[in-house]
Image (cartoon, rainbow, N blue to C red):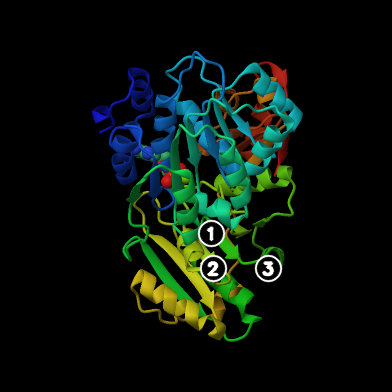
Amino acid sequence: MFTDLDLPGNLQNSLESLGYQSMTPIQSQVLPVALAGRDIIAKAKTGSGKTVSFGLVILKNLDSTTYVPQSLVLCPTRELADQVADVIRQLARATENIKVLTLTGGSSARTQATSLHKGAHIIVGTPGRIEDHLGRGTLNIDKINSLVLDEADRMLQMGFQESIERIIKLLPEKRQTLLLSATYPDEIKTIADNIMQTPAMISIDTTHSNDDIQQLFFRIKQQQDRTRAMQLLLLKHQPESALIFCNTKISVKEVTNFLKDKGFAAIALHGDLDQKDRDQNLIRFSNLSSNVMVATDVAARGIDIDKLDVVINYELSKELDIHVHRSGRTGRAGEQGKVWTLYDSTDRYRIEQLEKHFNIKIENHTLPADHVLSTTPAKSATITLEINAGKKQKLRPGDVLGALTAEDGINGTSVGKIKILATRAFVAVDRGDVNKAREYLRKIKGRSYKTRIL
Ligand code: ADP
Ligand code: MG
């Protein structure tokens, strides 16, 4: 129980208001040790609750009356930084005046510099942008007492190692360092040795048991059969949310175009998209307005979706760790996940590695029969509406929900996720209620707005 921990009352209050009672396994191992001040390396699979583990530690180390950055959290992507900052803000909500600032490529460095100048306690950012601010002299890290490397394996994979090392050189030596990762490659060991003081190594077994995830493998004889194999699987099972992984951007584009051509409302996620399209695509997929998303590993970082029916490996990943990572995205929250992997004869070595890792015997499954090709892809249950206003216009989720459900508006149960960005907002509504929803969204709190179907 969180109440057994040595935590200040305001943090206990936030935990209570968030409805968190029992700790996840990683939290119950990390927190007692980390709250006592020790450096930590924590390895646990995606979705195991690592954010709350380090969030509580940095908040405990914080003096909110001094307006200088005291905690630095490094993350691999902007989406992840935003998520982490949101969690920290939630944990800090019973404490007055704690300022959490994200420093990532998502917004202008000048605006960020202004916010920094006004004062911030906790900085969450990507290594590139943090270095940028250090170079400009707009970020002062002399008083940092807690450093967190979140998703350390991903940061290394994305080539941030040197950047991280340069940042760490500038930090005070007397500090607490927490490193979180889903996997623990050798490079992390080396870094950890350099930047941590006799860390406690805490590891919750990352391999899913075979009960958590059903892994099915489908052998592809010729390259041109790959897209068709995927089409057969999707048509046969009609998953509500399927994430398809490709090894390259080019594959992502090809596969997305193929699926669109076959009538699927597939969306792509890769590094060439601009921020606006990226946000929009992620929102549509996570609120179930699109059933299929095709992504590269890097681009898929930061996707936080509770209910991923299936992960499809259009191509087997080059590394075992990546396969484990991909697999970890399905089967959350106690439900059995599914991973479907397409492989060919050149993958033999990697298949053997997987057999060892998961302790399974990999057999070739038969693809669904061709007659499913006459089925049409199911339409998504919801549709996303974009509203031409956001945080800048002081629009809040409650306002949108209120407008939609006012008087004889649509039923609250037909309203899905609401996401408010700086100048735009998105709401998912049941397909059948779209027209009515648009009508009710014309006026929110007395002001007129425009909506658009995505
Ligand atoms: P990780 O960083 O390990 O991938 P997250 O920190 O993102 O995982 O947590 C995954 C989910 O678990 C989040 O939705 C979070 O709100 C939830 N969660 C975290 N801790 C608890 C807890 N003690 N009880 C219930 N839910 C929790
Ligand atoms: Mg995490």
* Earlier sequence position, callout 1 versus callout 3: 1
Question: What residue is pinned by disc 1?
Answer: 242
Secondary structure category for the residue under label 3: helix
Q: Is residue 9 left or right of residue 109?
A: left
- Residue 171 lies in what quarter of the image? top right
Which corner quadrant holds the N terminus? Answer: top left
Question: What residue is pinned by disc 2?
Answer: 313
Q: Residues within 10 Å of mark 1 (few under 14, many from 20)?
A: many
Secondary structure category for the residue under label 1: strand
Instruction: Compute the Cα span from label 2 to label 1.
Output: 10 Å
Q: Under 8 Å from ligand 1: the CB of mark 3?
A: no
For the point 52% across and 55% down, which residue is it?
Answer: 241
Residue 251 circle label = 3
- Residue 268 lies in what quarter of the image? bottom right
Q: Is residue 381 shown above or below 82?
A: below
Tell me the amino acid under the disc marked 3: Ser
At which x and y percent is residue 440? 64, 27
Tell me the amino acid under the disc marked 2: Asn
Tell me the amino acid under the disc marked 1: Ala
Q: Can residue 383 be seen in this snapshot?
A: no
At which x and y percent is residue 202? 33, 49
* Earlier sequence position, callout 2 versus callout 3: 3
Q: Can residue 6 be seen in this snapshot?
A: yes
Instruction: Compute the Cα span from label 1 to label 3.
Output: 16 Å
Eye-nearest disc, 2 or 1: 2
At which x and y percent is residue 318? 56, 70
Q: Which is more toward the observer, 369 or 347? A: 347
At which x and y percent is residue 345? 54, 86
